[in-house]
Amino acid sequence: MTNLQGKTVFITGGSRGIGLAIALKAAKDGANVAIAAKTDTPHPNLPGTIHDAVDQINAAGGTGLALKVDIRDEDQVKAAVEKTAETFGGIDILINNASAISLTGTLETEMKRYDLMNHVNARGTFLASKTCLPYLLKAENPHILMLSPPLNMDAKWFKNNCAYTIAKYGMSMCALGLAAEFADQGVAVNALWPRTAIDTAALAMLGGIVKPENCRSTDIVADAAHYILTQPAKEYTGQFLIDDEVLSAAGVTDLDSYKVDPNGTLYLDFFL
């Protein structure tokens, strides 16, 4: 399979950033894309709503579906998945993109923030996967893709932001477990993570820790995701993948076009 034409993609948290970039890449192939996210009216600090995303998906050549969903709410997730399957006749791909972040130490992390990260990242990923799987098991080439890092138990990844790492690794553990559990049934489950910082609106919310000129664009993650999702599900599963390594395997050798600033020095992601 070389493209996603006619496939139905369910994306959590896809109203902006990496999720939206993946959605638009699929839309260019003529895919159906369901955007399941909370923002249905303009956010005071972040651009984009589920309706804006669907407008862009339709303009790119796909068919979009806007779904107001709090990934923490089981009933809302079930209703969104059912609506997607009813609208498009099934679900072929799940992108677990929704994520909450707080790069704070233990004493600075309020429990409501801890709960938010774990409910969105780990629990939300498990819930969306569990709910989509009955449809994915009927699909021709089903894929689940987590936007989460490789698992690494080195303490350096925990010591400065323990709560966030626990929550984010929860997504990766879902990838590890689901890949093994559903391998014999032909559902591919992988995790994808960027080599460098990616220029998104959410990055600005972190207080300027990383500047845009030190980032790659969201296109590099979208292009890597597209390659993954077009691979044979029974053969391409159970992997923790890095965006530039995926593109290298796909024959892409020039990555300079993904740099926000051609002369900028790239900032490596802190999970690598």
Image (tube, rainbow, N blue to C red):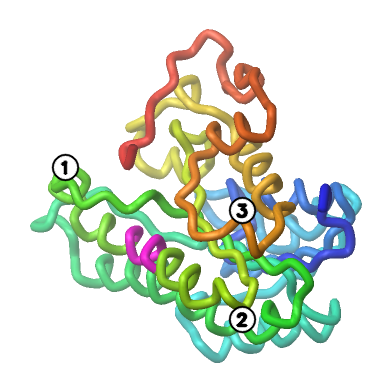
**Vertical position of residue 49 compared to residue 247: above or below:** below
Sequence-wise first label, 2 or 3: 3
Query: Is 97 placed left or right of 231 in the picture?
Result: left
Please give the label number shown on residue 19.
3
Looking at the picture, how far across and down is residue 137, in whole percent? 68, 81
Mark 1 lies on residue: 156
Query: Is 28 placed left or right of 178 in the picture?
Result: right
User: In this rendering, does residue 84 appear at all?
Assistant: no
Q: Residue at x 61, y 55 (%)?
A: 236
Quadrant in which residue 57 is drawn: bottom right
Q: Secondary structure at mark 2?
A: helix
Comparing marks 3 and 1, which lies closer to the viewer? 1
Q: Residue at x 49, y 59 (%)?
A: 238
- The outermost residue toward the left is 107
- The outermost residue toward the bottom is 75
**Vertical position of residue 212 compared to residue 9: above or below:** above
Quadrant in which residue 35 is drawn: bottom right
Mark 2 lies on residue: 133
Q: Secondary structure at mark 3?
A: helix
Amino acid at circle 1: Lys
Q: Secondary structure at mark 1?
A: helix
Sequence-wise first label, 3 or 1: 3
Comparing marks 2 and 3, which lies closer to the viewer? 2
The residue nearer to you, when weighing 45 against 132, is: 132
Spatial CA span between label 2 and label 3: 20 Å
In the rendered structure, which segment of residues is drawn in magenta?
A: 168-173
